[in-house]
């Protein structure tokens, strides 16, 4: 979601709340026993909960089904998900570009650290598809680097692409490729 569409959504939400407040005040002119203002108050109370549910869908949560049953790798994956959520928060609340850029750089640096650590663990456990897995990591880093370069050119559109890519790639990678080496870690 671009900055413009986020701003439009916030404007619509603000106008809706203001409209509800005006209708509540006008509704009480009908009398305190009239059900309309009380119904509108109920709607007004529900709006923040609905908004929170919608916003929460933008964030990723760790699930035990993601575990590869290796504490170090699982902790790295949890940290990566947390960093993606930090980036999502920075973008959602429109923090300054320096914060977003720093969060992106930290995320990339930690991802590279995690990949090297994961690759060493795979090698130590003689994982037969190591080279293929390592190539997946290299492709991901190249794709994110390309997104970051595009972000530096067009800061509004590309950051959402980066977030979507990171979330879907990491979850799919953890649930797919990373699960394949799980049995080798038990040996």
Image (tube, rainbow, N blue to C red):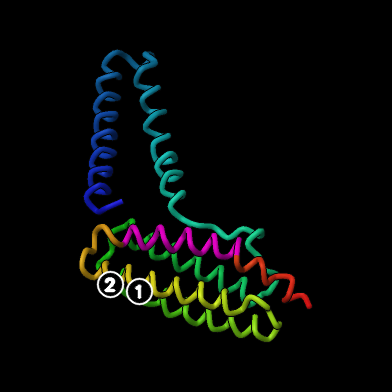
The residue wearing badge 1 is 145
> Could you tell me what secondary structure mostly forms the magenta stretch?
helix
Q: Is residue 156 shown left or right of residue 161?
A: left
- Identified at 67% across, 78% down, the residue is 128
| Residue 147, horizontal then vertical, whole percent | 32, 67
What secondary structure is marked by label 2? helix
Q: Label 2 crowding class (10 Å Cα cut-off): few <14, some 14-19, many 20+?
A: few
Q: Which residues are magenta?
A: 159-176
Q: Is residue 126 shown left or right of residue 47?
A: right
| Residue 97, horizontal then vertical, whole percent | 25, 68
Task: Say which quarter of the image contains residue 160.
Answer: bottom left
Marks 1 and 2, how far apart at CA: 6 Å
Q: Quadrant of the C terminus?
A: bottom right
| Residue 103, horizontal then vertical, whole percent | 36, 72
Q: Does residue 160 show up magenta in the picture? A: yes
- Identified at 31% across, 57% down, the residue is 93
Closer-to-camera residue (69/184): 184
Q: Which mark is residue 149?
A: 2
Q: Is residue 127 shown left or right of residue 46?
A: right
- Identified at 42% across, 34% down, the residue is 46
Closer-to-camera residue (169/13): 169
Q: Is residue 69 shown left or right of residue 39?
A: right
């Amino acid at each position: 979601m671009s900055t413009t569409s986020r701003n439009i959504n916030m404007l619509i939400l603000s106008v809706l709340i203001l409209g509800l407040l005006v209708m509540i005040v006008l509704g009480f002119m009908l009398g305190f026993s009239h059900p309309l203002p009380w119904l509108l108050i109920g709607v007004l109370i529900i709006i923040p909960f609905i908004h929170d549910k919608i916003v929460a869908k933008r964030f990723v949560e760790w699930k035990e089904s993601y575990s590869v049953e290796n504490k170090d790798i699982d902790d790295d994956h949890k940290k990566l998900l947390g960093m993606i959520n930090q980036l999502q928060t920075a973008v959602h609340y429109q923090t300054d570009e320096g914060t977003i850029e720093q969060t992106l750089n930290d995320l990339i640096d930690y991802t590279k650290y995690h990949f090297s650590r994961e690759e060493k663990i795979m090698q130590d456990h003689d994982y037969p598809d190591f080279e293929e897995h390592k190539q997946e990591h290299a492709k991901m880093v190249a794709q994110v680097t390309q997104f970051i370069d595009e972000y530096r050119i067009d800061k509004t559109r590309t950051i959402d692409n980066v977030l979507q890519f990171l979330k879907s790639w990491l979850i799919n990678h953890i649930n797919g490729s990373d699960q394949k080496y799980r049995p080798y870690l038990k040996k």
